[in-house]
Amino acid sequence: MSGRPFTRRDRTTREAEEAERLAPAAVRAADSRGRARPEPPDEYRTAFERDRDRITHAKAFRRLKHKTQVFINPEGDHYVTRLTHTIQVTQIARALAAALSLNEPLAEAIALGHDVGHSPFGHTGEEALSPYFPNGGWHHAAQSVRTFEVLEDLNLAWEVRDGIRAHSWKIQ
């Protein structure tokens, strides 16, 4: 065993590892289109790792634990919240990204943020609200981005915002 039990890997080292490891079509953090407001890079985390962490610490994300995914008897052991659903989606997104040599932190950030903007009563609530939004209706994906950008002011990378906005089947 060497005298150094830990190896320090800074952001530039990790970005170089991404360049070697990811599929040619994968998005690399070093090639991000940036943020709405420029900010200095983190010393250790890539842009997408930073966004994943920002989302998990956001108040809107934490509130998912109080929102139901499916209305069933809450006394049973099959009660699913939006937070439970989001964790499951994130695990699947990360596994698929790993299997396809895509950017795992980017997939995680998108998955973690995908349902934050849901209206009450899920997709039924979204349909009920749509007539009151004449420019294309209510879209929870667009509301998720608004929540992170306007209410939480997270200044997420363009790729994370775009992935959250475009995850829904309603986005053309």
Image (spheres, rainbow, N blue to C red):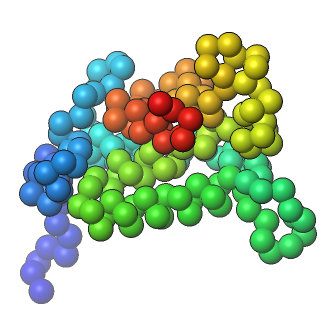
* Image coordinates for residue 42, horizontal then vertical, percent: 27, 39
Judged from this view, the residue extending furthest toward the top is 134
Task: Name the residue rendered at 72%, 41% in the picture.
Answer: 123
Picture layout, residue 169 above or below residue 95: above
Left or right of residue 74, residue 57 in this image: left
Q: Nearer the viewer, residue 18 or 142?
A: 142
Picture layout, residue 168 above or below residue 147: below
Q: Quadrant of the N terminus?
A: bottom left
Picture layout, residue 90 above or below residue 133: below
Left or right of residue 86, residue 98 in this image: left
Q: Quadrant of residue 161?
A: top left
Q: Does any portion of residue 78 appear in the rendered image?
A: yes
* Image coordinates for residue 79, horizontal then vertical, percent: 79, 65
Q: Does any portion of residue 153 appear in the rendered image?
A: no
Task: Name the residue rendered at 90%, 69% in the picture.
Answer: 75
* Image coordinates for residue 139, horizontal then vertical, percent: 62, 30
Q: Nearer the viewer, residue 122 or 134?
A: 134
Task: Name the residue rendered at 74%, 62% in the picture.
Answer: 80
* Image coordinates for residue 12, horizontal then vertical, percent: 13, 46
Task: Name the residue rendered at 84%, 56% in the picture.
Answer: 71
Q: Nearer the viewer, residue 2 or 166?
A: 166
Picture layout, residue 110 above or below residue 100: above
Judged from this view, the residue extending furthest toward the bottom is 1
- Tally the numbered discs: 0
